[in-house]
Structure formats: C-alpha cells, structure tokens
Amino acid sequence: MSAPQQPSACSAKLWLQTACVFAGAVAVGLVYNSASPLGLRNEAPVSTDKPADEVIPQEGYFNETLSLKLETSAAPAPQVRPTALAPGAAAATIPSLTWPQVQALMKTKKIVLVDARTKSAYDLGHIPGAVLLPGDAPVPEMQAFTARYPKDTALVLYCGSTTCRASERLARLLVGAHGFTDVSEMPGGYAEYTMAQASQPKAKP
Amino acid sequence: MKVTLVFDPRAVLRWLLAILLVWAALGKIANLQEFHAALLAYRLPMPAPLIRLVVMTLPWLEILCGILLVAGGMRKAALLWSILLCAGFVLATGQAWARGLEISCGCFQLDFPAAKQWLESVQFAFVRAMLLLAMAVWLFRSVESETA
C-alpha cells in the first residue's frame, strides 16, 4: 500500500500539470498559426481603401470597384425603416457566387462588394474595394447606402464564412424592403477570399 | 456469468464536456479570422497582442482539455483549465450582456426565427457558459473527493 501523498505535493503536481497543459497549447497554437494558411496574419489595410468611417461620406462618393461618381440624393430620406419584407421576398432566391466568379465579375461588370460583418471585423481585414454595411446597420447608415446606389446596382454581399448568415439576411432585406434587383451573395465569405489569397504563390520582392 | 452495467454520471458528463470543448475548438480553428473578429466584438479590456495570443492558443487549450478529460492522466489539470475557460466565457458573455452588446455569430442554421434569434443571442451564450462552468466545477470536486 502506497503512502498517501501530502496535500502540498498534490498541489504542486497539479500546478505543474496545469502549466504543462498551458505550455503545450501555446506551443501548438503558435506553430499552427505560423504554418497554416488559416492562421492569423498581420494584414495591413490596402492603401487605396477608404477608412471605415469614411465609407459613406456626406457629399459625392467614388467607389473604385464601381468606378462611378454618384451624387447623394437631394430627396428627403424616409423616416421609417422598412422592416417588413415584400410578399414573396423571403422566398426569393439569392444567387450564390464563389470568389473566382466574383473576381471575374469585377473584371467584366461593375459590381459593388458589400461587407455585411461588423465594423471591427471589417477593420481587421476585408476584400479590397468592399463597402461596409453591417447586417444590423442603424437606419441612417442603411438610408445613406440605399440613397447612394441605384436599385439596379449589382451588389455582391459577403460576411465571415459559410457559418455566417448575415449576408443572406441583408441580401433579403435589400431585395425585399429596399427594392434592389441585382443582389448576389458569396457564401464562402471573407474566409474563402483569405484561403484563395493564401494558396496563391507569393510574388518575389 | 452475470454482467452488471454501472451507469457513472461523472463519466457521461466528462465525455459531454470533452465533446463540447473539442467541437467548439474545431470551429474556431477552421476560421481564426472570424474568431478574432468575434472576440473583438465582446470589447474586452485587453490589449490587442493579448487578444491575438488568446485567439491562437485558446482553441488548442480546449482540444487538449477535451482529450485529457477522456484519456485520463492529467484529468484534474484538464478540469481546472476547463473551469478557468468556462469562467472566462461567463465573464465575457456576462459583460457583453450587461453592456447591451449585440453579438450574433450566425452559427445555428434553423428555420425557426425566434429560436434562432435566441440561440444566436449573447444571453444564450451566457447561460450555456454558466451550465458548462457548473458541470466543470462539479466534475472537479468529484475527482477531488475521489483522491482525498
């Protein structure tokens, strides 16, 4: 029969094991982050992108993706935010696009990429040229967006990844409540874009 | 020969906790960028480098704890870390709830809008974290009473 361990020895052993678990997790996490294309990267914002707080300026707007200069509408904005979808809008099919398809559209057709994530996610990194419009954007922000772009503007919405439904919900809202007629979604989201960027061979300096 | 099956609730809860930890970790590892953004949405009073370190290591800590809970060996240490992790989740979701932060992960794909809204809410995240914390604390105390 083995002698019972002293409480202090048990505590020391427990803390040592706890430290080992933590050290193991830190080591594996750091190695995985540096080796995997899914790891966190220090992405600096693209210099041609406007800061998020200047995405919706007060007068005039130039969007490099759309390459049009649009003037803000002089008509008074509606005071009530439409929350009810038009009949059948909920069942409307929102076309899904992959990142290569979106890339092809950007070359051949003037589209507006819309980032439906939060501002903090947008600031961390976004597809170059994308306009921020969070899924839960306040009324003034939504009104500014809908006033800036004609209803037949080709919009392509994305959010985080396939597990995020914000872009789909925003797409249905833009179609059903605001009358946009050409709205698509990129279900793979920013995750698909980063994976595509990571898989591309890096250009030599 | 008589075979007796013994139902051990501690083993069931240990497996349940392990599966939940590993499942949550795999979701985070698959998209660290989104996890980083989600963590920032909680507006925790932590410097940016520390948040990045948490993003890089927390999922692996969850996986290690899940494996050790089932495999044994350093089970007590795994339970201690599980308690710390769950306590951290309770604090993060609790302060987000108290501050009225809108955090929606869009993780659940259901056809019931009301249920989906609740499951994506910070309130549900807080309740879930509390339940996991209670489970981890109970398991830790049961292991302590075994070794005492």
Image: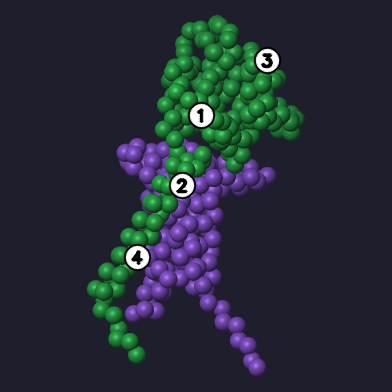
Please state the total of marks drawn on the protein image. Answer: 4
Q: Are marks 2 and 1 in contact (CB under 8 Å)?
A: no
- Residue furthest toward the front? A204
Image colour for chain A is: green
Q: Earlier in the sequence, mark 4 or mark 1?
A: 4
Q: Which residue lies under the disc numbered 1?
A: A202
Mark 2 or mark 3, whichever is nearer to me: 2
Q: Earlier in the sequence, mark 2 or mark 3?
A: 2
Q: Is label 3 in a helix, a strand or a loop? A: helix
Q: Residues within 10 Å of mark 2 (few under 14, many from 20)?
A: some
Q: In percent of the image, x 24 and y 73: which residue is there?
A: A8
Up the image or down, A69 lies above or below A38; here it is above
* Residue B36 in the image, given as x and y percentages of width and height: 45, 40
Q: Chain of mark 4?
A: A
Inter-mark Cα distance, 2 to 4: 22 Å
Q: In percent of the image, x 34 and y 80: which residue is there?
A: B148
Inter-mark Cα distance, 2 to 3: 38 Å
Visible residue check, residue A46: yes
Kind of residue at badge 2: Tyr
Q: Residues within 10 Å of mark 3 (few under 14, many from 20)?
A: few
Mark 2 or mark 4, whichever is nearer to me: 2
Q: Which mark is residue A17?
A: 4
Q: Are marks 2 and 4 on the same chain?
A: yes
Kind of residue at badge 1: Lys
Up the image or down, A10 lies above or below B120; here it is below
Q: Are marks 4 and 1 in contact (CB under 8 Å)?
A: no
Up the image or down, B83 lies above or below A56; here it is below
Visible residue check, residue B58: no
Inter-mark Cα distance, 4 to 1: 41 Å
Q: Which mark is residue A32?
A: 2
Q: Quadrant of residue B83?
A: bottom left
